[in-house]
Image (cartoon, rainbow, N blue to C red):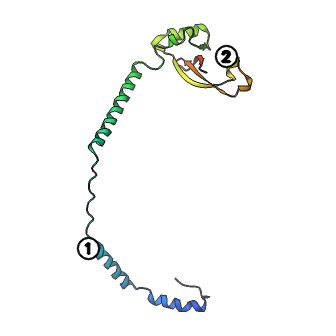
Amino acid sequence: MTLPDDTPAWLRPARADFARLQPGAAQDAAVLAALTRQLLARPAPPPAPPLHEPRWLRRLAWGSGALGTAAAALLSAALLLDPPGTGHAAPLAGAGSGFIPLVPDGEFRAALAAGRSAAVWLQPTELPRERLALLGLPFDAARADELVRAELMLNPSGQVLAVRLLN
């Protein structure tokens, strides 16, 4: 490192001392060789002892994994055998079910009579309270911005057949 020519007078003696103390290439090589010898002479660290977990913990891990797999398989089989909305749509849409048809009555009855070939699905949702007026139901304009929990009855193509208000 070189200092600019405008080095103060009091710093020049220190600069000369540091230049004299700077190690040469031979001294650097000797230090590197000594460090290498020390590193090679060191014994290898002993291997870490194996972790022994309690037997009950291993059984718990395997058991919970097996239980989760079995539950997933059973739920998948139940959904494959009886998808949501199949077999239960006719009783839900009967008199007193609370569903308000949004399509013509003939189309609504045809969707319910289709049975398993074209099952209807129930989709929970939240509607703005102002939508009650569009359904012909009374609503309070002061609470128009609030949400109402509802269930939508959908056919497989995604068309909304009916709505049921839950609160």
Circle 1: element type: helix
Residue at 48% x, 88% y is: 19
For label 1, count other residues whose C-alpha is less than 10 Å away and answer few (under 14), some (14-19) or many (20+): few
Q: Which of 2 and 76 lies nearest the eye of the viewer?
A: 76
Q: Which residue is mark 1?
A: 41
Q: Which residue is mark 2?
A: 135
> Residue 54: image x %, image y %?
28, 45
Quadrant hosting residue 66: top left
Q: Which of 110 and 52 lies nearest the eye of the viewer?
A: 52
Circle 2: element type: loop
For label 2, count other residues whose C-alpha is less than 10 Å away and answer few (under 14), some (14-19) or many (20+): few
Residue 8 falls left or right of residue 139: left
Quadrant hosting residue 81: top left
Residue 113 falls left or right of residue 47: right
Q: Which of 57 and 153 lies nearest the eye of the viewer?
A: 57
Note whether 60 is above or below 86 in the view shown.
Answer: below
> Residue 29: image x %, image y %?
35, 81
Note whether 106 is above or below 132 in the view shown.
Answer: above
> Residue 35: image x %, image y %?
33, 76
Note whether 82 is above or below 32 in the view shown.
Answer: above
Q: Quadrant of the C terminus?
A: top right
Residue at 38% x, 84% y is: 25
Residue at 50% x, 10% y is: 91
Q: Which mark is residue 110?
A: none
Q: CA distance from mark 2 to mark 1?
A: 88 Å
Tell me which amino acid carries mark 1.
Ala
Tag 1 or tag 2, which sits nearer the N-term?
1
Residue at 52% x, 89% y is: 15
Q: Which of 62 and 158 lies nearest the eye of the viewer?
A: 62
